[in-house]
Image: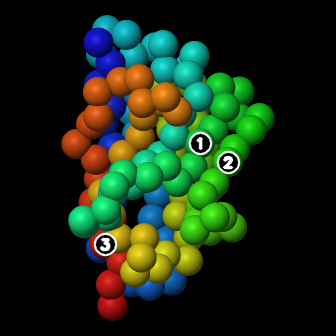
Amino acid sequence: QVQLVESGGGLVQPGGSLRLSCAASGASGSIFRFYEMGWYRQAPGKQRELVASISISSGSRNYADSVKGRFTISRDNAKNTVYLQMNSLKSEDTAVYYCNTRRETFSWGQGTQVAVSS
């Protein structure tokens, strides 16, 4: 069983930055390092969407067009953690952010709320 715990969200003004973290824990948490990981977000009234993904070795990273150039995904396999650095935040980035494997293998965590507002 793997539990995903997201943290780092909050209220920030447009143009601001946040760094999100997602830690995999549980008896099988160490298998995190064998999966391509992704950050997803779900805005009110909208479907959950993938915003960034990273390969197992961090050699390949992909971003949705809406966040390209502003967000950076990274991972630390030794810590079973994936990060999302978000810069130049916009109001349209407001959403609950989740992590999971690229294939949505694990149960979803509680997510972390990001609100961008002046």
Disc 3, SS: strand
Q: Position of residue 7 (x, y in %)?
A: 32, 48
Q: Amino acid at mark 1?
A: Ser
Disc marking residue 62: 2
Residue 65, how many percent across, how many down?
63, 64
Q: Earlier in the sequence, mark 3 or mark 1?
A: 1
Element type at mark 1: strand
Q: Split into 4 quadrants, where in the image is the N terminus?
A: top left
Which residue has dot 3 on it?
Answer: 115
Amino acid at circle 2: Asn
Label ID, residue 53: 1
- Disc 3 versus disc 1: distance between alpha carbons? 22 Å
Relative vertical location of residue 89 with respect to residue 74 in this rendering, above or below? below
Residue 5 figure quarter? top left
The residue that appears at 44% across and 85% down in the rendered structure is 14
Which residue occupies 41% across, 40% down? 99
Q: Which residue appears at 58% of the width and 68% of the height? A: 66
- 4 relative position to 102: left or right: left
Nearest to the observer: residue 12 or residue 56: 56
The residue carrying pointer 3 sits among few (fewer than 14), some (14 to 19) or many (20 or more) residues within 10 Å by Cα, namely many
Q: Earlier in the sequence, mark 2 or mark 1?
A: 1
Please report the residue visible at 33 percent of the width from the left and 84 percent of the height from the top.
Answer: 117
At which x and y percent is residue 103?
A: 49, 28
Q: Nearer the viewer, mark 3 or mark 1?
A: 1
| Image marks 2 and 1: residues in contact by CB distance under 8 Å | yes
Dot 2, crowdedness within 10 Å: few (<14), some or many (≥20)?
A: some
